[in-house]
Image: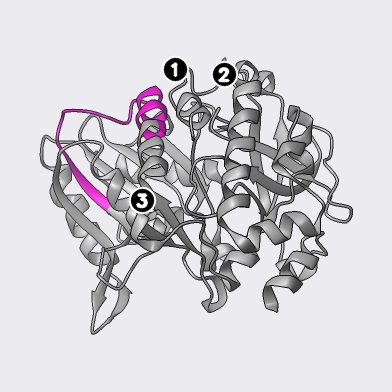
């Protein structure tokens, strides 16, 4: 019976990490037992590392829980229940032609919704006031199952949507950018009385703002307009600008102040909503834990040191994504360093390292899966 997860995702304060240590541990152990019993591949991976769900006796033991690199999910499909029990399946964006496929059952989706309502409410993302949406990403298409597309569209439900304009549209079976269409929509909506909300990739926001600046086009969007960003710069990393440059350009071209710019962090293999605080830091919510590991030894490092980002959550049962290793480099800071009042540690993403450059202790698991 799954009971601890529901209590965890129903916790009133989304950043009460210290108060939920025991509950989080129980939820992880509960999830680990389910994966062990229902996914043969995951069970063999745990056995390879001589680890059992019952070994999760105290919070420190979570560091010993074998993690799976996102590479594993991009090369193998791992499910812990039949597809008919999954309400949806979502995929990653498909780095280098390979993508992860993650399943979600009703309980996982229900708790995910509770998480979004709690965190979104804390950040004042919901409103009864209608808004026009500029989606800086893909227009939904029957052949597109990526989580980033589903998430961006889902964000347009935070308020009643008067219209949706997409930066990437399908033409002749393929996506192509439509920055001119986005700019036309921005100019049109700036003359109305309803707020405009942007949602999607920061890279496309930058390209739109850059083009508007070149065309000497400036607007002042209606009061209540917001910019919601997530998904990273992906293939445009060489053109990435720092946050302050992007925020400054948004205020200059659109009239949207930095306080109305909100960023998200997440991954299909770790479907937790990390929403930045007013100081633009990603505080760790009660639904997850973050371990920073040494690039060479993979041992946990001290707070404030750079390493690989290991993410843990017991959110879903359908896929064994309990503990995953990203190819992101990050730093975990003490919450008090932020100054926003939240005591939960916050994660700073430094950059990304290629998986081929990482010698991980999951190599044995990967070798088993290849067989």
Colouring style: one colour
Residue 51 image label: none
Residues at circles 1 and 2 in contact by the CB criterion of under 8 Å: yes
Q: Quadrant of residue 195?
A: top left
Q: State left or right for residue 155 relative to residue 202.
A: left
Check disc 2 and report the residue beneath it.
16
Instruction: Label 3: state its secondary structure.
Output: helix
Q: Which residue is mark 1?
A: 12
Q: CA distance from mark 1 to mark 2?
A: 9 Å
- Magenta span: 115-134
Which numbered disc flags the more N-terminal residue, 2 or 3?
2
- Mark 3, Cα crowd under 10 Å, few <14 / some 14-19 / many 20+, is some
> In the image, which disc is placed on residue 151?
3
Nearer-the-camera pick, 25 or 118: 25
| Residue 250 position in % (x across, y down) | 39, 44
Where residue 333 appears, x then y in whole percent? 71, 30
User: Looking at the image, is mark 2 or mark 3 nearer the viewer?
Assistant: 2
Q: Is residue 266 visible?
A: yes
Where in the figure is residue 133, as x and y percent of width and height?
22, 47
Give the residue drawn at x 64%, y 66%: 71
> Of the residues under marks 3 and 1, which one precedes in the sequence?
1
Residue depicted at 71% across the width and 35% down the height: 332
Q: Is residue 335 left or right of residue 188?
A: right
- Nearest to the observer: residue 113 or residue 187: 113
The answer to which of 1 and 347 lies nearer the viewer is 1
């Amino acid at each position: 019976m799954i009971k601890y997860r529901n209590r965890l995702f129903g916790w009133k304060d989304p950043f009460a990490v210290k108060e939920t240590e025991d509950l989080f541990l129980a939820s992880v152990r509960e999830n680990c037992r389910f994966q062990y019993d229902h996914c043969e591949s995951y069970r063999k991976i745990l056995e390879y590392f001589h680890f059992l769900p019952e070994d999760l006796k105290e919070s420190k033991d979570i560091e010993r829980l074998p993690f799976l690199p996102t590479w594993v999910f991009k090369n193998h499909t791992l499910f812990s229940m039949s597809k008919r029990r999954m309400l949806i399946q979502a995929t990653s964006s498909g780095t280098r032609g390979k993508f992860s496929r993650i399943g979600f059952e009703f309980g996982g989706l229900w708790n995910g919704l509770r998480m979004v309502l709690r965190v979104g409410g804390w950040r004042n993302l919901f409103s009864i006031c209608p808004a026009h949406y500029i989606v800086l990403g893909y227009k939904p298409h029957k052949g597109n199952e990526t989580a980033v597309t589903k998430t961006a569209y889902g964000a347009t439900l935070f308020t009643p949507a008067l219209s949706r304009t997409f930066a990437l549209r399908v033409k002749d079976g393929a996506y192509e950018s439509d920055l001119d269409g986005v700019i036309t929509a921005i100019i049109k909506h700036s003359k109305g009385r309803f707020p405009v909300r942007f949602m999607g990739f920061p890279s496309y926001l930058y390209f739109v703002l850059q083009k508007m600046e070149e065309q000497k086009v400036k607007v002042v969007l209606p009061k209540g307009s917001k910019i919601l960003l997530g998904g990273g710069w992906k293939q445009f990393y060489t053109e990435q600008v720092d946050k302050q440059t992007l925020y400054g350009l948004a205020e200059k071209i659109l009239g949207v102040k930095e306080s109305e710019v909100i960023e998200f962090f997440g991954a299909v293999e770790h479907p937790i909503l990390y929403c930045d605080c007013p100081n633009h830091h990603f505080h760790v919510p009660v639904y997850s834990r973050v371990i920073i590991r040494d690039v060479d030894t993979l041992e946990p490092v001290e707070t404030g040191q750079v390493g690989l980002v290991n993410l843990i959550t017991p959110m879903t049962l359908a896929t064994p994504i309990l503990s995953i290793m990203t190819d992101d480099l990050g730093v975990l800071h003490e919450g008090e360093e932020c100054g926003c009042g939240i005591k939960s540690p916050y994660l700073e993403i430094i950059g990304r390292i290629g998986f081929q450059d990482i010698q991980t202790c999951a190599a044995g698991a990967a070798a088993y899966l290849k067989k």
